[in-house]
Image: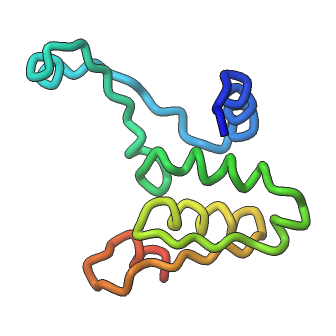
């Protein structure tokens, strides 16, 4: 599947107002290390701490009403499943995340709450 500029615009419209608008700032140190001008986007400020919230929410909005009602299962070791679970509960969709059982898997522990 090829991603087009129109796909990006449609996704931005779908999630507008539901995701934290995060700042960008230049990183002097990383720019010096890499020899390039680097600008960082602070997606760690999203509710669940990652940029993946954008994709998870956009995917839920792209589902038909019947598919949304049937639910989504995320086989993930972390952030993606956490985002689907969070937004699924907000959208009244069943979106269980199935994380690894390791006690050190922090996103998995958060999903179980």
Tell me which corner region of the image, top left, top right, bottom left or bottom right, holds residue 20: top right
- Give x and y (percent) for residue 109: 39, 79
Task: Tell me what residue is drawn at x 37 percent, y 86 percent.
Answer: 101
Q: Is residue 105 above or below residue 41?
A: below
- Give x and y (percent) for residue 71: 75, 72
Task: Tell me what residue is drawn at x 68 percent, y 66 percent.
Answer: 88
Task: Tell me what residue is drawn at x 72 percent, y 56 percent.
Answer: 60
Question: Which is nearer the eye, 54 or 70?
Answer: 70
- Count the labels in the image: 0
Q: Is residue 55 above or below residue 99?
A: above
Tell me which corner region of the image, top left, top right, bottom left or bottom right, holds residue 9: top right
Q: Is residue 104 above or below residue 53?
A: below
- Give x and y (percent) for residue 12: 67, 32
Question: Which is nearer the eye, 110 or 63?
Answer: 63
Q: Is residue 110 left or right of residue 102?
A: right
Q: Is residue 97 above or below residue 87?
A: below
Q: Is residue 46 left or right of residue 27?
A: right
Tell me which corner region of the image, top left, top right, bottom left or bottom right, holds residue 6: top right
């Amino acid at each position: 599947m090829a991603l087009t500029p129109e796909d990006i615009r449609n996704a931005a419209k779908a999630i507008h107002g539901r995701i934290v608008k995060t700042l960008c700032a230049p990183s002097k140190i990383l720019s010096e290390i890499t020899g390039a001008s680097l600008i960082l986007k602070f997606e760690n400020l999203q509710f669940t701490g990652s940029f993946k919230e954008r994709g998870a929410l956009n995917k839920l909005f792209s589902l038909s009403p019947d598919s949304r009602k049937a639910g989504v299962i995320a086989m993930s070791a972390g952030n993606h499943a956490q985002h689907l679970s969070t937004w699924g509960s907000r959208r009244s969709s069943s979106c269980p995340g199935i994380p690894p059982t390791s006690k050190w898997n922090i996103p998995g522990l958060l999903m179980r709450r």
